[in-house]
Image: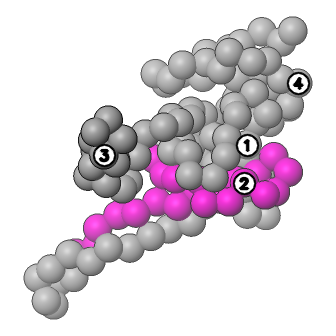
Amino acid sequence: MATTRDIGIDVAAPSRACDDPHCPFHGGLAVRGHIIDGQVVSAKMERSVVVRREYLFRNEKYERFEKRTSRYTAHHPPCIPLKEGDLVKIMECRPISKTKQFVVIEARKGELAIRGEDASIAAEEESA
């Protein structure tokens, strides 16, 4: 079993172990730079996921905000179980491939923060 190392930020280490060299907890991959919260859009690739991030962009001409989205390809270590729709936290690392410069460091299943009030409405309907 591989030892779990501290990556330097406040996230819980995964309970499962893996032997992936690109895992920040059990391998030798160093993380640095940006930390991004997003939602998994696609988990069909082997050890890779596509993460979507929504943000507001200020339009100076019309003095309003518009919603924009960005998609990031991130490395998915096997010690963190994920599926489409899960909310994740990804962090920047060295380039792993042509499109992967991020790695998944935390998964928060069951939270529907991106959908906002829809989660509370659905929970109320189920309990009634």
Asked whether residue 33 is in view, the answer is no
Amino acid type at mark 4? Asp
Residue found 13% across the figure and 89% down from its top: 62
The residue that mark 2 highlights is 43
For the point 83% across and 23% down, the residue is: 18
Residue 80 vertical position relative to residue 16 in the rendered view, above or below = below
Are the residues flagged by discs 2 and 3 in contact, CB closer than 8 Å?
no
What is the x, y in percent for residue 119?
Answer: 34, 47
**Residue 31, percent across and down?**
62, 35
Residue tagged by mark 1?
76
Residue 125 bears which disc, if any?
3
- Alpha carbon separation for disc pair 2 and 4: 20 Å
Residue appearing at x 81%, y 57% in the figure: 45
Element assignment for label 3: helix
| 119 and 62: which is toward the camera | 119
Image quadrant in which the C terminus is located? top left
- Crowdedness near tag 3: few (<14), some (14–19) or many (≥20) residues, C-alpha within 10 Å: few
Instruction: Label 1: state its secondary structure.
Output: loop
Q: Is 79 contained in the magenta span?
A: no
Please tell me in which quadrant of the rendered image residue 55 appears. bottom left
Q: Is residue 53 left or right of residue 68?
A: right
